[in-house]
Image (spheres, rainbow, N blue to C red):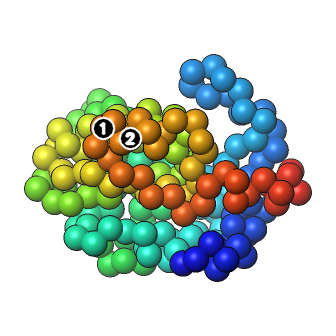
Amino acid sequence: MTPTALGPLAARVARAACVAAPFTLPDGRVLDSYFDEYRLGADPQLLHDVAAALALLVPEGTEVVAGVELGGIALAVALSAATSLPAAFVRRRPKNYGSHRQVEGADVAGRQVVLVDDVVRSGTQAAAVSTVLRTSAALAVHALCVVERPLGGRELLAEHGVVLGALLHERDLPAVAKVAS
C-alpha cells in the first residue's frame, strides 16, 4: 500500500485513536499526545482495515503472528484472520498460575514469527518480547506496528536483530490527531 493510499486510513486511525493529551512513558518522559489502541480495537471496521493494510507488510515466510500483551492482542487476532496465519500471544511476564506460560496460542518453536504491537516508541517492550519469543525457540527477527514514534525504537530493535515495519509514522498523523481530541 502506497503512502497516498494510506492517507484515508491514516486519517481514520488518527480520528479514532490519536489523543492530544499528556501521556507518561514508563521512563517518566511525558508526551503531548498518544495512540489509544483500545479505540482502534473497539472499532471493528477500522481494526479490519488496519489488519488488511498490515497484512501487506508481513514478511514472506512468516508462520505465526504474535501479539504483545495487551496492545498487540487485538491486532494479532485481526492480522491472523487477514492472513490465515496462526496467532500467538505474549505476556510481559509468565502467568503465575495455571500453565505458567508466557507465550500462549500457536506453537512458536522453530517457526518464523512476526511480532505485532500497536505503537513502537523506545522499542524496549518489543525488544524484550522478541527475547521472550527467542527463548521459546521462535525465529523472531521481524516486528510490525501500527504507529512508529521516533523515540529510538527502530534503532534499539536493530541492535537486537529485529527489523521493524510500521504501517504509519507519527508524521503521518499529527494534523488529524489534533482534530481528534
Neighbour tally class for label 1: few under 14, some 14-19, many 20 plus, Cα within 10 Å: some
What residue sits right under mark 2 in the picture? 157
Mark 2 to mark 1: distance in Å? 5 Å
Residue 74, horizontal then vertical, whole percent: 49, 60
Instruction: State the quadrant of the N terminus.
Output: bottom right
> What residue is shown at x 88% (from left), y 57% (from top)?
179
Any mark on residue 101, and which?
none
Tell me the element at label 2. Answer: helix
Q: Position of residue 27 (x, y in %)?
A: 57, 21
Look at label 1 and name its amino acid.
Answer: His
Of residues 3 and 145, the one nearer the viewer is: 3
Residue type at tag 2: Leu
Residue at screen point 75% across, 68% down: 11
In the figure, is residue 2 to the left or right of 20? left
Q: Is residue 66 left or right of residue 152?
A: left
Quadrant assignment, res 100: top left
Question: Does dot 1 land on a helix, a strand or a loop?
Answer: loop
Residue 158 sits above or below residue 73 on the image? above
The residue lying at 18 percent from left, 51 percent from top is 138
Q: Looking at this view, is 107 or 30 the one in front?
A: 30
Q: Which residue is mark 1?
A: 160
Q: Is residue 56 above or below residue 41?
A: below
Which residue is drawn at the image coordinates 71% and 27% (left, top)? 30
Whether pointer 2 and pointer 1 mark residues with C-beta atoms closer than 8 Å, the reply is yes
User: Is residue 73 visible in this depiction of the protein?
Assistant: no
Give the residue at the far top of this rendering: 28
